[in-house]
Image: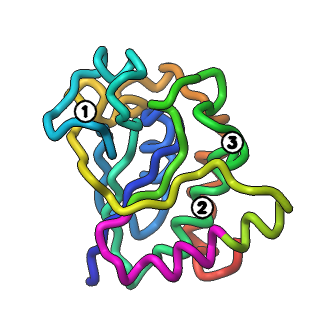
Amino acid sequence: MKAQEIYFAGGCFWGTEHFFKQVAGVLETEVGYANGKEDRSPTYEEVCTDQTGFAETVRVVFDADVCDVKFLTEMYFHAIDPLSLNRQGHDEGTQYRTGVYYTDNSLLPTLQSVFREVENSLGQTLAVELLPLRNFFPAEDYHQDYLDKNPQGYCHLPTELFRWAREQKANKRNKI
């Protein structure tokens, strides 16, 4: 097993986390706050002020022998509106911006390639950050696995997307 990690900001982290939990090869997820202005753990209330610079983000630990970062990033682009700045669904503010944050520089060429492919297919500049991870602080316990604990809870993603992600398990080596 070759465990790696990547961080995806895709709007409200409840749905983004639940989406990635469906993908074969994902070993662990954790919601939190990334790439903020401060080097201390913010509260959810502070992040919601739109003043901290933190984005709601999901840390994804995956087995690169089962699914690679290219596949996960392609999946990510199916779960976001890559042209929307600081907004996903009904959620608006810089904490809901989209971004892919990496800790391993060897992943950058692959990430850049996927970003170029998506940008070329859309014919527009993406509103998605691609940056090294500056900081990440886990969110409060009640945010972790939120949709597992609250199946009828709010989610900006359609439930069909979760089913589609589960179906990709059988087809994960195929182009999405």
| Residue shown at 51% from the left, 32% from the top | 96
Q: Which residue is mark 2?
A: 75
Decide which of tag 3 and tag 2 comes sooner along the chain. Answer: 2
The residue that mark 1 highlights is 139
In the image, 66: left or right of 86?
left
- Please name the amino acid that badge 1 sits on: Ala
Residue under label 3, please give it: 160
Which segment did they paint magenta?
Answer: 102-115
Circle 3: residue type:
Glu
Which residue is nearer to you in this view: 20 or 5? 5
Q: Is residue 101 left or right of residue 82?
A: left
- What's the CA distance linking mark 3 and mark 1? 26 Å
Position of residue 93 relative to residue 35, above or below, is above
Q: Nearer the viewer, residue 36 or 141?
A: 36
Residue 18, numbered circle: none
Question: Which of the 4 image quarters holds residue 118?
Answer: bottom right
Q: Position of residue 173 (x, y in %)?
A: 60, 82
Query: Few, some or many C-alpha atoms within 10 Å of disc 1 (few <14, some 14-19, many ≥20)?
Result: many
Foreground mark, 3 or 2, reads 2
Q: Residue at x 48, y 20 (%)?
A: 153
For label 1, the SS is loop
Where is residue 42 drawn, in percent x and y? 21, 27
Distance between mark 3 and mark 2 Cα atoms: 14 Å
